[in-house]
Image: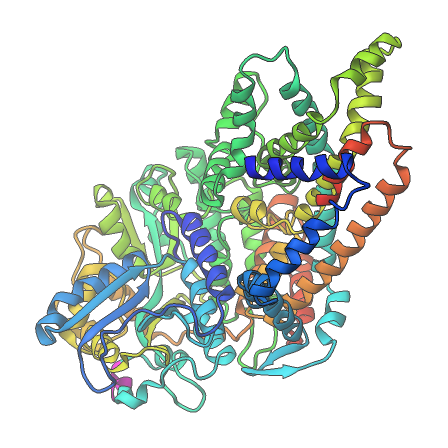
Amino acid sequence: MRFTLNKRARGMAVTAAAVASVAALVGCSATAADDGATDGDVSGKITIWTWNAPGDGLEAAVPAFQKLYPDVEVDVQDVGNPAIWEKITTGMAAGGQGLPDVLNIGIDYMGNYVEQFPGELVDLREFGADSLEPEFPSGAWKSGSGADGAVYGIPYEVNATGFFYRSDIFEEAGIDIDSIETWDQLIDAGVIIKEKTGVPLYNQDKAATEADSAGLWQLQTALQDSFYFDESGDITMNGDAGVTSLELIKKANDLGIVGDVQGSWDNLLAQLRGEKPTAIMPAGGWMAGVMENEAPEMAGNWGVRLPPSVEPGGITAAVNGGTYLSIPTASKNQKTAWEFVNFALGTLEGQKLVYEGGGMFPGYKPMLESEGFAAPSEYFDGQSPNAIFIAELEQDTPVLNYTSDYARALKAYTDAQTRVLLSGADPQQALDEAADQVVQQTGRKLAD
Amino acid sequence: MNVLSSTAHASAGPTAEAAPFAAPPRPPRRRRRSSIGHPRITPYLFLLPTIVLFLGFKLYPYLSAFWTSLTSNIGGVITFVGLDNYLRLLEDPLFYKALGNTALILVVQVPLMLGLGIVLSVAFNSLLLKGRAFFRMAFFVPIVMGLVAYGILFSALFDSSAGIVNELLGYVGIGPIPWLVDPFWAKISIVLAMTWHYTGQNAIIYLAQLQSIPGELYEAAQVDGANGWQRFVNITLSGLRPALLLTVVLSTIGTLQLFDEPYVLTNGGPDNATLTVGMYLYQNGFKYFDFGYASAIGYALTVIIAVVSLIQFRLFRERAPKPISPKKSMSPKEKTR
């Protein structure tokens, strides 16, 4: 998950606005005027809620869209992530009051919104969205659809895990990154790197007071074909896979090769630029684009490969989230909103513009197969991040069942990790406590 | 102002002097007559905006939240579940943790802040202090500061690696303190931030009260041979009693509802070390979409606040010694609060 530059400021401003709008009585809160556009016309103004880089991508598609529909005005708003989730929640809890025409929704929130606020998102089959289904990876498509096949979101980003590393640092330490096959070997290498270069293997927000800080555990657990929940929604976070991951995290931390960097967008950029150096940076595929745009001076210093497996010979691919574009039923300009979504994500022309503008890794197959998409990148020293991501998406990656209780599980895990990293708690015990807490809060049961 | 005081004067003068005459009944008669031309609902019309706002923005949310606290979102359907949310609350370890944190901050922060407030107010009131207006202003200004600016300011101050506080402590050889990232120090940070934010406000309330204590009392005490400390305890503190009660109750309520500081500084962490009841309510409502449970937390908090405030009112009233002479002149003020 990404965080904007001034996440706190935005979060607070948004919360204040949210509180104010909740307090306003239903019916007297102001809604944006829609220039009288009706369901039938493609005209008027549409507003999109998104955040920094995905917003840049959508913005890039606007001029071409306006050539098709000159009367339409598109307002792409960078609401900030994670502030956007609270803002959407508030709008949905108020029956759609104040929501814009298009929402950019994370895969981890999709199921929650659909389950908790039924009828708030348009079933895009109304506009024939089901015809796009074969054009997207089936897993990504499914997570944006209801059990009955209703289409609530068109995949915008489909992220495989990029395992990025600083080739210059590995070189300086005399370690061949290609020889590393497992996380255990990587941790051994980390000790040498720390010794020879002083650079930590990776940085973590150990206190997790800024962000959730669970990305690494989720990756390592996914590499063992597990997650917080199994496919029937039972809790698996304290299973063998989860405990193994947290033990790896503890081991690295105890060896003193993990830096403590708070999870903000600023700090992320500082790591990319080498100001707060890190030897590796496992992240969603979107990071490749962010690196090129935000740290151009580091060209040639970053490399990318498949993540090492946890067990020797284990899985080396994992999906790292994704996002969707959805239309709330409260939008008064759904037809126009749909035409924009369809143009940006359902046409090769739109996809290319969006990709060039924001660098989000797309799920649209014609785009993935298009000429030059998987071409070697100069920035990555002749490697092709996109070819690696495409190969990962083709592997049989585990389906991650986020359920409607992902946020609770994420929080419970993050607290457990903090106990392990700051007070040396036992991983098994910390995870058992976290799982019990989720049971108490949600009434779900522990998987056998 | 002028009009008010002159009418007060005019009515006080004749009634006091000319009591045996028919003067006193006159003003009521006049008032009654004048109301004939105006409908009796006039005062209610003037009150109407307030009543409407109260109904819409206070009473309605109260009732709506109470109803919500009896419901749960089951598969997208808001379902009446009776007291389930409250029963769940009783068995929720995180709720108790939040209560414990809140109580700890309360017990440490409120006395610290009010003590400082008293000291400051005495200083503000002192004739020895040059530039009093400036100091009063300077200490009061933090309360005006918005949440966002406040959060950014203290995050910058307390940042463990690049924070200004640690930088300064480094010069005197105290070595980096993990302000916001250690469970113990995170609580301290919250206490410090709150103290900075609210002490000035309390000092101003005390100052107002101090200025109503007549100077003759101090002179009289001095003549009787009371030393400075005795004068402070017996005159200043006694005189401050109504303001003390007010600030203790308000600060306690404010701290029990504590949300801003943990929200902007620590996000309730690390590992829930600064999770307050307010934060927990917010998490359940806005992070987990569990509005029923969040409302139940809100109502539980309301009950706790009511009980605590009641106890405080009782304690202060029973402990109050026989009012000293200036107390009479203060009692109307006390009533208006």
Residue A405: percent from left, percent from top: 56, 71
Report the residue at 86% width, 28% height from top. B324
Q: Nearer the viewer, residue B218 or A367?
A: B218
- Residue A95 lies, in percent from the top left, at 46, 77
Main secondary-structure element of the magenta-colored stretch: helix
User: Horizontal placement of A125 versus B36: left or right?
Assistant: left
Q: Which residues are magenta?
A: A131-135
Where residue A258 sits: x, y (%)?
Answer: 49, 43
Residue drawn at point x = 43 percent, y = 91 percent: A148
Q: Nearer the viewer, residue B261 or A175?
A: B261
**Quarter of the picture holding the C terminus of chain B:** top right
- Residue A215 place in picture, x, y as percent: 46, 58
- Left or right side of A138 for A108: right
> Which quadrant of the structure image shows residue A98?
bottom left
Q: Nearer the viewer, residue A61 or A301?
A: A61
Q: Quadrant of the N terminus of chain B?
A: top right
Vertically, is B282 above or below B118? below
Tell me, yes or no, if residue A301 can be seen here.
yes
